[in-house]
Image (spheres, rainbow, N blue to C red):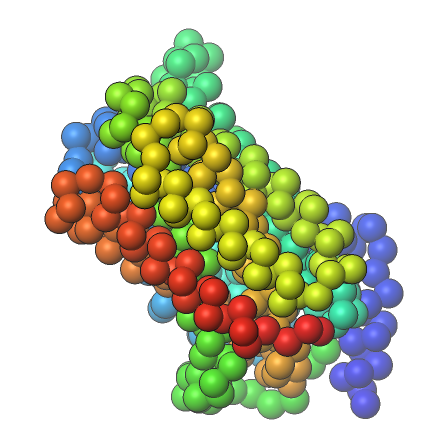
């Protein structure tokens, strides 16, 4: 009863509480700069596809290690404090590239970025549930993903600007992206620290074994695999979309990077529209329509060499994949309301798909001799999401 009263009190949220949380969602989007940064690092250091795919894979590897322990940490220190720790780690990761651009420097930066984002995604999403009623959780998380997508969308634009405006970037070139986002991270820390948020206390402490046992529940396991496929498609498109244009149209990297921006434009638009559509349309119907868009997109990327068809395919992936995470995540949380912290840790551990998919795509591309191999790997993820559609509950 005490927990319920606390929760209801926490949901009487104001714009002064929501705004700092949404700025944290913006900081969460910094992880998506890894796709853009990887392409520039590959060009600067002359890396192979397999070597370059290590960067996005390394970022998301830490979700496997830190997500479940973060769920346990939230039980001890609370969700807000865990988010603040994640922002500090994120800020540190963004400062490192200012002092160098070597291979190991970027590995260290991307590792910390992945650790900080694992902490943030695990703690920030359930923190929202302290401010929002369950029936509005999916639409609110989708709006958070819209804010996150803005940061993702801006990353390739800022990097491309920095690469061509060396005279005003203090010699950083495309790496000017990092200090700009570091400043936003510090601002997020300041605003969230000053924001009072009442959290419900967990009913019991949990350990790694108790968290892992939740995967024994069929629906939670399906959600976990759904998150893996979502982020795999997301990171995979972010990483290989420019490469497809470079391979099939002979574009330079600076021009082909528009494909990444196009993806995030439509992902951002999809998140914004989804935050309203999900208030009126059943999750299963909207999810099915989203997956259908991605299936069409994969067909276009397989069969078409036309620049316009490639752009349409990338746009459809961006729009279709924009609401997958929010729906799957809210389905998992609402399925186990007494174990939100533990379920959140497991779902964010599913972002390990961002490691599995790029590695598989890199090797498939080398094996096939073209990026058709990468498209085939992403298509497998879309097919799984088609299956998951049948399991979604309309709540």
Instruction: Please report the residue visible at 56 percent of the width from the left and 45 percent of the height from the top.
Output: 319
Q: Is residue 354 visible?
A: no
Find residue 164 and report its image quarter.
top left
Classify 335 as above or below 314: below
Instruction: Count the marks.
Output: 0
Which sits in the foreground, 300 or 160? Answer: 300
Instruction: Please report the residue visible at 56 percent of the width from the left and 87 percent of the height from the top.
Output: 205
Question: Could you tell whether 116 is left or right of 366 in the image?
Answer: right
Residue 91 is situated, as x and y percent measured from the top left of the image, at 49, 45
Classify 349 as above or below 158: below
Q: Is residue 212 visible?
A: yes
Instruction: Please report the residue visible at 25 percent of the width from the left and 44 percent of the height from the top.
Output: 372
Residue 131 is situated, as x and y percent measured from the top left of the image, at 77, 65
Question: Could you tell whether 320 is left or right of 126 in the image?
Answer: left
Which sits in the foreground, 312 or 158? Answer: 312
Classify 2 as above or below 82: below
Q: Quick one: quadrant of the C terminus? A: bottom right
Which sits in the foreground, 305 or 362? Answer: 305
Residue 57 is situated, as x and y percent measured from the top left of the image, at 30, 53
Q: Quick one: quadrant of the N terminus? A: bottom right
Instruction: Please report the residue visible at 54 percent of the width from the left and 74 percent of the height from the top.
Output: 390
Question: Could you tell whether 332 is left or right of 256 in the image?
Answer: right
Classify 123 as above or below 113: below
Residue 224 is situated, as x and y percent measured from the top left of the image, at 46, 72
């Amino acid at each position: 009863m005490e927990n319920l009263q606390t929760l209801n009190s926490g949901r009487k949220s104001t714009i002064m509480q929501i705004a700092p949380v949404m700025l944290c969602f913006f900081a969460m989007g910094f992880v998506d700069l890894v796709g853009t940064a990887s392409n520039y690092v590959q060009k600067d250091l002359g890396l192979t596809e397999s070597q370059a795919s290590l960067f996005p894979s390394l970022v998301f590897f830490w979700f496997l290690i830190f997500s479940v322990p973060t769920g346990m940490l939230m039980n001890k220190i609370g969700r807000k404090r865990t988010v603040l720790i994640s922002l500090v780690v994120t800020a540190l990761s963004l400062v490192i590239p200012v002092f160098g651009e070597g291979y190991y420097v970027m590995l260290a930066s991307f590792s910390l970025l992945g650790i900080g984002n694992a902490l943030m995604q695990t703690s920030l999403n359930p923190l929202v549930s302290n401010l929002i009623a369950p029936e509005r959780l999916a639409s609110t998380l989708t709006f958070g993903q819209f804010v996150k997508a803005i940061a993702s969308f801006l990353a390739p634009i800022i990097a491309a600007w920095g690469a061509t405006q060396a005279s005003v970037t203090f010699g950083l070139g495309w790496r000017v992206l990092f200090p700009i986002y570091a400043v936003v991270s510090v601002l997020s820390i300041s605003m969230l620290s000053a924001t009072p948020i009442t959290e419900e206390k967990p009913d019991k402490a949990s350990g790694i074994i108790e968290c892992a046992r939740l995967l024994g529940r069929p629906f939670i396991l399906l959600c976990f695999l759904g998150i893996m496929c979502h982020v795999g498609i997301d990171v995979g498109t972010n990483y290989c979309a420019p490469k497809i244009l470079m391979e099939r149209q002979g574009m330079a990297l600076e021009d082909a990077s528009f494909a990444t921006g196009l993806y995030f434009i439509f992902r951002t638009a999809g998140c914004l529209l989804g935050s309203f559509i999900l208030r009126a349309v059943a999750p299963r119907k909207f999810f099915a329509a989203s997956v259908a868009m991605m299936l069409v997109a994969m067909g276009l990327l397989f069969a078409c060499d036309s620049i316009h068809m490639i752009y349409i395919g990338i746009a459809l992936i961006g729009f279709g994949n924009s609401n997958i995470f929010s729906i799957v995540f809210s389905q998992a949380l609402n399925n186990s309301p007494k174990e939100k912290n533990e379920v959140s840790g497991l779902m964010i551990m599913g972002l390990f798909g961002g490691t599995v998919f790029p590695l598989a795509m890199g090797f498939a591309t080398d094996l096939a001799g073209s990026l058709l191999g990468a498209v085939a790997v992403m298509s497998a993820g879309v097919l799984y999401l088609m299956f998951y559609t049948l399991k979604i509950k309309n709540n």
